[in-house]
Amino acid sequence: MSRNKKLNKRVQKNSQNDGLAEAVREAQESRVPASQKSHIPSPADLGLEWHDSEETSGSNRIVFQPSVDEKLIIDDGVINKFDIRKLKMALMVLAESGTDMSGLVFIAPGNSSPARERNRYLFIERSFHNKNELITLVKRYVRRSHFMDDGMRAFNQKVKDASGRYLIEESAMSWLKDKKAACWAWCYIKNKNKPIPLPPYQYSQGDFSMHSSAFISPGNIPADIPSFYSETGISDPELTLKGLLEAITAFFDHWLVERHIKYEELDKLRNMWEALNQRAELRKSPFVFLDGGSSDAIDWCWTYAKSKMYGINWFRFGATYDGDRLMLLNSLFQVWECQPDTRKLFVQELRRAWSQRKFRAEHKQRKLFQAYIAPSKKEMLSQIAKEQGMKINETLERLIEDAYSLMKK
């Protein structure tokens, strides 16, 4: 290669290197932050209002609502601390304020007159008697009520006032901690079987029924319980002491009358229970023969009582377990309003019918056996039966079994 050609290549190479260096310089300059080269105006500089949609602080995410939705923020902490009774009062406050709760909650009658004021009650859909469901319901409708404008403090005060007006103290129901008393009171309330006082000339000497002048005295006036228990949405409880107490408490909470009226009726119930337990014919259950009995026997007794004990709203009562049905029979027998002679006749007829049923059941698998024997042999058989404390047919069966066993040996 000639000297001139080598020189030309060297010049060309140096020129390429200079172009590459220039390109690198330009690239480096382009990486300098834009803020060092020019000023980008902020929204404030442009006179615009800027709202962040969310902001992260530590591990907690805080969501900022638009200003138009600020009224939807409620004090969940306060509502979460309400017990079931206060939650129901919260719903009552919302209903009284005119909040439309889609038929899930309302006060009946809607337009209450002074004459009907005593029968006002709170309806809550059956599926919302669980505490968590009640909390959800209260929060949902507080958001749709005018209390969001008045403020949660006003709502909480209304709930407090309503609780003081309607809720009775649990201590007033301490006598219901006896399961028999609780079951009787629940049956009385649900049955709503109020006695109608008879004219004085119909009172008989020694008549201590609830219809008598002895029972209808200043201290033993029958409780005037409204008939809307089954219309409040309260579910039938488990027939345990806890379940019965909760159901009775729920009824009085749903009953929207001044609580002094509730105290008066609760006292009447207690007086009635004490009066019932002073009567010998009611202290002892007529169904005692069913203790440990079969389901078939209890079914028979339930059907028999339904056909004889008029005035009991049987369609309102039902139970799955034998023990529960027996407990209901005992309580409903005490709730049943009738004259002493009627009650006494019922017990006599019940025992007679049970004995006949039992006799038929025992003889269902037996066959009639007739034979002629000498009178002296019949007398001997009678003496053997009497000596062994058995019936003649049972004695004859025993003699046959013994003779058969000896024959097989």
Image (cartoon, rainbow, N blue to C red):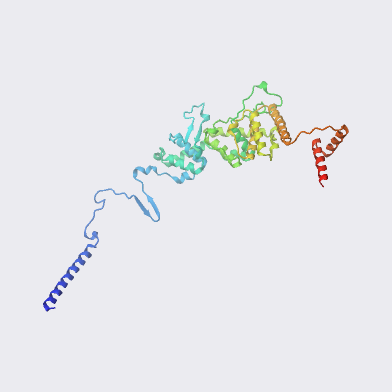
Q: Is residue 395 left or right of residue 323?
A: right
Quadrant of the rendered image containing residue 322: top right
Note whether residue 388 is visible. yes
Q: Nearer the viewer, residue 210 or 239?
A: 239
Q: Residue furthest left?
A: 4
Marker count (numbered): 0
Q: Relative to 130, is 303 above or below?
A: above
The residue at the point 80 percent across, 32 percent down is 370
Coordinates of residue 34 in the picture (x, y in percent): 23, 59
Q: Is residue 184 left or right of residue 94?
A: right
Q: Relative to 228, is 19 above or below?
A: below
Coordinates of residue 69 in the picture (x, y in percent): 36, 43
Quadrant of the rendered image containing residue 57: bottom left
Q: Is residue 222 left or right of residue 24?
A: right
Coordinates of residue 274 in the picture (x, y in percent): 66, 34
Quadrant of the rendered image containing residue 174: top right
Note whether residue 219 is visible. no
Q: Residue furthest top?
A: 201
Q: Residue furthest right?
A: 376
Q: Quarter of the image containing the N terminus? A: bottom left
Coordinates of residue 8 in the picture (x, y in percent): 12, 74
Q: Nearer the viewer, residue 50 or 186?
A: 186
The residue at the point 67 percent across, 33 percent down is 276
